[in-house]
């Protein structure tokens, strides 16, 4: 995972609530054994026509949104299936952050593991971003600084966003959490010596 | 000094703390059982190989093939043919991964194979007080046994494979209290659809549910699994039901259940896994089972549900702009109108299956309406058992003959049309009544339209060819 650097980026808005992970990447694209190349399947059923050509009316297909790196979406983004292919597809497309008034728990966890920032914003901030986009589609920018947990909106207003200290540490430093867990081995060995396994799957077939 | 009263969730959580949560780091939580399937695990095994890590506890891990497996009948050679090369590659990769890392695998076509959330309880691996995870959001199913069970992503699958642990912040708790008693024709699926309709699909975000109340106590284990299964559709990663005699009776004599003296010790411990009097939940909601009707969804998320006798809500019923836009988008996709009744709406497909409703009692319910009747010839009716063992049991009871005589398809076990990645799918524009858990756009096939309902409602609809209140089949 790359370490986080503050950035300023253009954004696109999907003003739809409850965008589930089946919309972010439909299940038929989950037959892969890799994380690579999923960006082309992002929002596939909304983004492409039945003949495979681009749907010109879908937001991120429009010329003014080419190269956007931040997605602003309606509440409860990422609900449904636990597929980590959703953040992989968003990152594969080029998104660095998703902004929503709230996220589904598993999607949020999965995103943070990959350095895709799920940034929780207030309804007021959400409405502001929607309004700015309506005025100058694809041209307005926001800045994201994780160290200070600050978003700078198109009008210059700075808003604070929440994030757990550990997830923040990991994303800023590009540290993955598996390394931390492996380093907890002493505690784990102590726990296991005091707790016999609850089940034994050995021999099942 | 007596210990402070604790919720069931707190008791399980506290037993599994390897390292407590601090202001800087989440808790390190021990995982008792890790369930693995072909779709969400390959990248995790790759990660292990790249880092030179082993699977720490293969004996607390079991894998099955379910999501991308065909459910088409076996060939003359007894083999279920996999025609999709990509699916086959994924299945082969799971075989290689399980072989290389020493993980037991229920491979396609073998006697114990089935949907990951059906096989755990079936083998007696799912037990009260355990922590259970799987790279699948419907892992919440196992909460029916009083186990803390939740879905994880592939990165976390790697964490558990390598360390048998997860980093977790403690969720909040919500009591979902359901008193009263269900009327004939109304079941567990209707309870959970009604709860989700009440709180919305984000209503449980950040919470673990605990289902309590007389209506829950009266349910069988399989009905409890149906309820816990769909906790995630209300936004809660996990749903719990305190274990009781119903639970113990169900587990007893399952292949990997404790035996002999160990059984008595286990049951004595499991009996303590209840929320203490005076323990405090972070939130409580209530539902009365007495007045519940069969439920059905009309829209494109599981929270868009109504009593089958009701009408689709209108814009005036929506509380805010986002909900109004959501309703409009959903009804456009479904090609339905606000204020419309769903009874009598013709459907193309009826799907009876999935980790929500594919167990033997679900199949018995469907068969109870289909026996001696035929399905409407315009409707494709698929019955997909949750596991090879469920299939075997159903065939021993003659349920397969009831389904086949009625004109339904009797398939091999798997996730099938719930997730539609194995070739079992709706065609664009088709309508289905489905006993599965998600009615998202395209979930059962691109352009397909799903009405979620109970096995009884699905069977009634299969007979008439149009959405039908099961209480009207006499």
Image (tube, grey):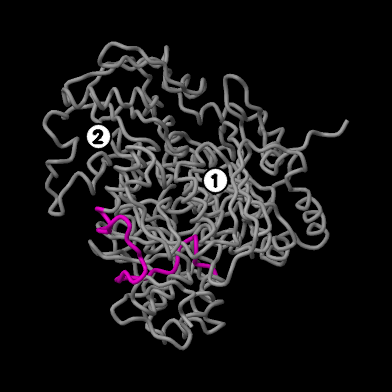
Residue B147: percent from left, percent from top: 64, 49
Quarter of the figure that contains the N terminus of chain B: top right
Rendered view: B323 above or below B384: above
Instruction: Give me the residue at 50% from left, 70% from top.
Output: B388
Instruction: Give me the residue at 35% from left, 36% from top.
Output: A87
Rendered view: B337 above or below B32: below
In the foreground, B441 or B115: B441
**Marking on residue A93:** 2
Tag 1 and tag 2 share a subunit = no
Instruction: Give me the residue at 67% from left, 54% from top.
Output: B213
Residue B367: percent from left, percent from top: 49, 79
Pointer 1 chain: B
In the foreground, B54 or B240: B240
User: Callout 1: few (<14), some (14-19), or many (20+) C-alpha neighbours within 10 Å?
Assistant: many
Q: In the displayed structure, does residue A102 sit left or right of residue B123?
A: left
Rendered view: B184 above or below B135: below
Residue B65: percent from left, percent from top: 45, 59
Q: In the displayed structure, does residue A165 sit left or right of residue B219?
A: left
Q: In the displayed structure, does residue A9 sit left or right of residue A117?
A: left
Q: Which residues are the magenta region? A: B332-359
- Magenta stretch secondary structure, dominant: loop
In the foreground, B180 or B236: B180
Give how far apart the Cα atoms at labels 1 and 2 are.
29 Å
Q: Name the residue under label 1.
A: B150
**Marking on residue B432:** none
């Amino acid at each position: 995972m790359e370490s986080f650097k503050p950035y300023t980026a253009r954004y696109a808005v999907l003003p739809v609530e409850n965008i589930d992970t089946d919309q972010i990447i439909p299940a038929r694209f989950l037959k892969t054994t890799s994380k690579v190349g999923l960006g082309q399947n992002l929002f596939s059923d909304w983004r492409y026509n039945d003949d495979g050509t681009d749907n010109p009316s879908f937001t991120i297909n429009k010329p003014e949104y080419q190269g956007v790196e931040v997605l602003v979406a309606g509440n409860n983004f990422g609900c449904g299936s636990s597929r980590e292919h959703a953040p992989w597809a968003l990152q594969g497309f080029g998104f660095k952050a998703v902004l929503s008034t709230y996220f589904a728990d598993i999607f949020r966890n999965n995103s943070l593991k990959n350095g895709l920032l799920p940034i929780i914003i207030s309804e007021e901030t959400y409405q502001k971003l929607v309004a700015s986009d309506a005025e100058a589609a694809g041209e307005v920018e926001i800045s994201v600084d994780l160290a200070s947990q600050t978003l700078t909106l198109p009008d210059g207003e700075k808003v604070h966003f929440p994030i757990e200290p550990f997830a923040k540490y990991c994303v800023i430093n590009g540290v993955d959490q598996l390394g931390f867990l492996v380093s907890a081995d002493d505690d784990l060995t102590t726990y296991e010596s005091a707790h016999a396994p609850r089940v034994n799957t050995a021999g099942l077939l | 000094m007596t210990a402070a009263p604790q919720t069931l969730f707190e008791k399980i959580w506290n037993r599994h703390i390897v390292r407590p949560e601090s202001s800087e780091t989440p808790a390190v939580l021990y995982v008792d059982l890790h369930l693995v399937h072909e779709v969400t695990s390959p990248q995790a095994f790759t990660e292990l190989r790249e880092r030179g890590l082993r699977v720490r506890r293969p004996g607390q891990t079991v894998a099955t093939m379910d999501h991308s497996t065909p459910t088409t009948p076996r060939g003359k050679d007894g083999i279920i043919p996999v025609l999709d090369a990509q699916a086959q590659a994924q299945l082969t990769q799971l075989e290689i991964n399980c072989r290389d890392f020493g993980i037991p695998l229920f491979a396609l076509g073998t006697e114990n194979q089935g949907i990951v959330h059906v096989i755990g309880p079936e083998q007696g691996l799912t037990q009260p007080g355990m922590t259970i995870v799987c790279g699948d959001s419907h892992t919440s199913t196992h909460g029916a046994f009083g186990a803390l069970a939740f879905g994880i992503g592939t990165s976390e699958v790697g964490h558990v494979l390598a360390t048998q642990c997860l980093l977790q912040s403690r969720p909040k708790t919500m009591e979902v209290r359901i008193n009263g008693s269900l009327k004939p024709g109304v079941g567990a699926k209707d309870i959970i659809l009604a709860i989700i309709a009440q709180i919305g699909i984000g209503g449980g975000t950040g919470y673990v549910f605990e289902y309590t109340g007389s209506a829950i106590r009266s349910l069988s284990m399989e009905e409890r699994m149906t309820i816990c299964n769909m906790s995630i559709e209300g936004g809660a990663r996990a749903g719990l039901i305190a274990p009781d005699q119903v639970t113990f009776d169900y587990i007893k004599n399952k292949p990997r259940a404790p035996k002999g003296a160990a059984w008595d010790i286990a049951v004595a411990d499991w009996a303590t896994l209840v929320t203490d009097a005076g323990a405090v939940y972070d939130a409580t909601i209530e539902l009365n089972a007495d007045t519940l009707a069969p439920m059905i969804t009309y829209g494109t998320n599981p929270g868009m549900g109504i009593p089958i006798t009701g009408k689709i809500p209108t814009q005036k019923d929506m509380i805010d702009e986002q909900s109004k836009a959501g309703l409009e988008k959903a009804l456009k996709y479904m090609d339905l109108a606000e204020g419309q009744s769903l009874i009598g709406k013709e459907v193309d497909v009826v799907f009876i299956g999935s980790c929500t409703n594919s167990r033997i009692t679900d199949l018995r319910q469907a068969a109870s309406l289909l026996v001696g009747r035929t399905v409407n010839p315009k409707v494709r009716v698929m019955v997909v058992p949750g596991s090879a063992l469920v299939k075997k049991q159903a065939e021993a009871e003659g349920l397969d003959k009831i389904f086949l005589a009625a004109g339904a398809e009797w398939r091999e076990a798997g996730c099938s049309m719930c997730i539609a990645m194995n070739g079992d799918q709706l065609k664009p524009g088709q309508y289905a009544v489905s006993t599965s858990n998600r009615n998202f756009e395209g979930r059962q096939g691109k352009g397909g339209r799903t009405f979620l309902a109970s096995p009884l409602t699905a069977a009634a609809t299969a007979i008439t060819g149009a959405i039908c209140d099961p209480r009207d089949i006499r």
